[in-house]
């Protein structure tokens, strides 16, 4: 109890005297705030991209590609294969038939609004069941495209990021102008980065015959996937691989999120070294300016341990304040910030928003506390080892 009493007494004394050292304290706080700001901001990119890639994923939906294909761009299926997939056990049925959507996936070049440089935008050809498979998709402006007409609908993410995708405008597909008649959203998922149209017309424009790249199949239930996958893998008429939609999108996002997370961590580590040095200088200055006070405390019977702990607490408090400032700035500036980046699996752009989550803010606070702890450790030990007699001579 006496030890804890000494810790609390010295800590309160240190914190009350912090205003007398406001210059050095502010330097430490804003140095650490900068580290946390960058750390949280960069990781919010990965978080936002991951959400965009996985938000539309459902456990009761499967994606079927040709065996060996890692993405829709690498796949190819004929009409007969898509029919067999749709009739496989486990696929949900509705009044219109099997809820399975054969889809064609091509890339078109469009200029970005921010830079006016061209980028790849997915153009997806679908059939009627696509809107049953993705039952969360909603037209928020205009109307759906008419089957058999050169019309398209555009995801809100694509419309926001790319020029020429405004409602009422048109885009060039296969040398012809196709009217933009609607804007849709899909829960913030990857579909919002795409342009959709009638698959049969798209096949004709790109001379694809009656071929597709994938089949999106809604299952009877989450548990039906095993039966569906097993039957397809043993059917000699097809050479395909079935994957849960959630797993497929998660795998698609792995490379980009790993790159962004690694880059953000590296930047934070490099900046963190600078922040540690700043915290070290701040606390060392604080200890040096209080040499007499610390020596007096030692002479009055205060132990070295409470002095070490009190200095560390002061350093961590400064760091946590800096972490709070940095996290708050990151949330205010970056949360909801809109951007687009490339999906390396399909070589197309994915529109997304930065997402500063509570988890990222907690990680930023932990990073700040760690920097404060490391930065204050050596000054704390130095304070505890001050020669009492020599220091008292300065009184």
Image: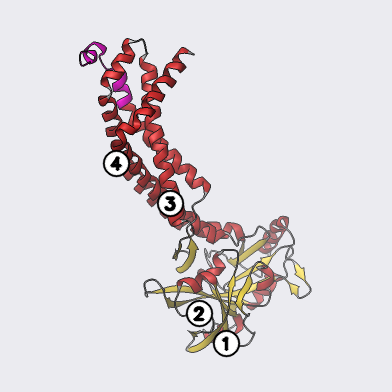
Q: Nearer the viewer, residue 63 or 326?
A: 326
Q: Kindly report the distance in space between the C-alpha atoms of the residues bearing marks 2 and 3.
A: 31 Å
Are there few (<14), some (14-19), or many (20+) residues within 10 Å of tag 2? some
Q: Kindly report the distance in space between the C-alpha atoms of the residues bearing marks 4 and 3.
A: 19 Å
Looking at the image, which residue sits at the far right?
Answer: 95
Specify which label sits upstream in the sequence, 4 or 2: 2
Residue at 49% x, 63% y: name it. 352
Q: Are marks 4 and 3 in contact (CB under 8 Å)?
A: no
- Residue carrying label 2: 166
Q: Which residues are magenta?
A: 379-395
Q: Quick check: 364 above or below 186? A: above
Q: Kindly report the distance in space between the C-alpha atoms of the residues bearing marks 1 and 2.
A: 16 Å
- Residue carrying label 3: 330
Q: Secondary structure at mark 3?
A: helix
Q: Nearer the viewer, mark 1 or mark 2?
A: 2
Are there few (<14), some (14-19), or many (20+) residues within 10 Å of tag 4? some
Q: Secondary structure at mark 1?
A: loop
Are there few (<14), some (14-19), or many (20+) residues within 10 Å of tag 3? many
Specify which label sits upstream in the sequence, 1 or 3: 1
Q: Position of residue 191 (x, y in %)?
A: 56, 68
Q: Kindly report the distance in space between the C-alpha atoms of the residues bearing marks 4 and 2.
A: 47 Å
Q: Secondary structure at mark 2?
A: loop
Q: Position of residue 378 (x, y in %)?
A: 30, 26
């Amino acid at each position: 109890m006496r030890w804890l009493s000494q810790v609390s007494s010295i800590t309160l004394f240190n914190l009350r005297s912090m205003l007398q050292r406001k210059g050095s304290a502010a330097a430490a706080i804003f140095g650490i705030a900068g580290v946390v700001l960058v750390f949280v901001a960069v990781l919010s990119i990965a978080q936002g991209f991951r959400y965009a890639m996985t938000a539309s994923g459902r456990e009761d939906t499967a994606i079927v590609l040709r065996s060996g294909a890692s993405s829709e761009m690498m796949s190819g299926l004929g009409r007969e294969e898509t029919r067999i997939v749709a009739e496989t056990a486990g696929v949900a049925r509705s009044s219109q038939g099997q809820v399975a959507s054969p889809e064609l996936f091509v890339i078109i070049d469009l200029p970005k609004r921010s830079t006016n440089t061209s980028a790849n935008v997915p153009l997806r050809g679908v059939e009627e069941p696509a809107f049953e498979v993705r039952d969360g998709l909603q037209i928020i402006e205009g109307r759906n495209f008419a089957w058999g007409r050169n019309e398209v609908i555009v995801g809100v993410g694509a419309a926001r990021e790319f020029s020429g995708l405004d409602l009422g405008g048109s885009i060039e597909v296969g040398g012809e102008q196709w009217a933009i008649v609607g804007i849709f959203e899909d829960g913030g998922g990857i579909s919002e980065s795409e342009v959709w149209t009638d698959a049969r017309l798209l096949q004709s424009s790109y001379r694809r015959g009656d071929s597709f790249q994938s089949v999106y199949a809604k299952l009877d239930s989450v548990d039906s996937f095993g039966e569906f996958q097993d039957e397809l893998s043993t059917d000699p008429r097809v050479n395909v691989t079935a994957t849960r939609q959630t797993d497929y999108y998660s795998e698609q996002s792995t490379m980009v999120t790993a790159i962004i997370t690694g880059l953000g961590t590296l930047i934070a580590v490099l900046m963190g070294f600078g922040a540690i040095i700043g915290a070290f200088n701040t606390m060392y200055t604080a200890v040096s300016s209080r040499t007499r006070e610390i020596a007096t405390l030692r002479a009055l019977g205060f132990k070295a341990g409470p002095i070490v702990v009190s200095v560390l607490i002061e350093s961590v408090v400064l760091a946590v304040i800096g972490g709070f400032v940095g996290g708050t700035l990151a949330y205010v500036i970056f949360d909801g910030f809109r951007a687009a980046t490339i999906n390396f699996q399909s070589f197309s752009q994915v529109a997304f928003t930065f997402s500063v989550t509570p988890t990222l803010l907690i990680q930023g606070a932990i990073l700040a506390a760690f920097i404060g702890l490391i930065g204050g450790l050596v000054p704390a030990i130095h304070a505890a080892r001050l020669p009492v007699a020599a220091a008292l001579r300065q009184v």
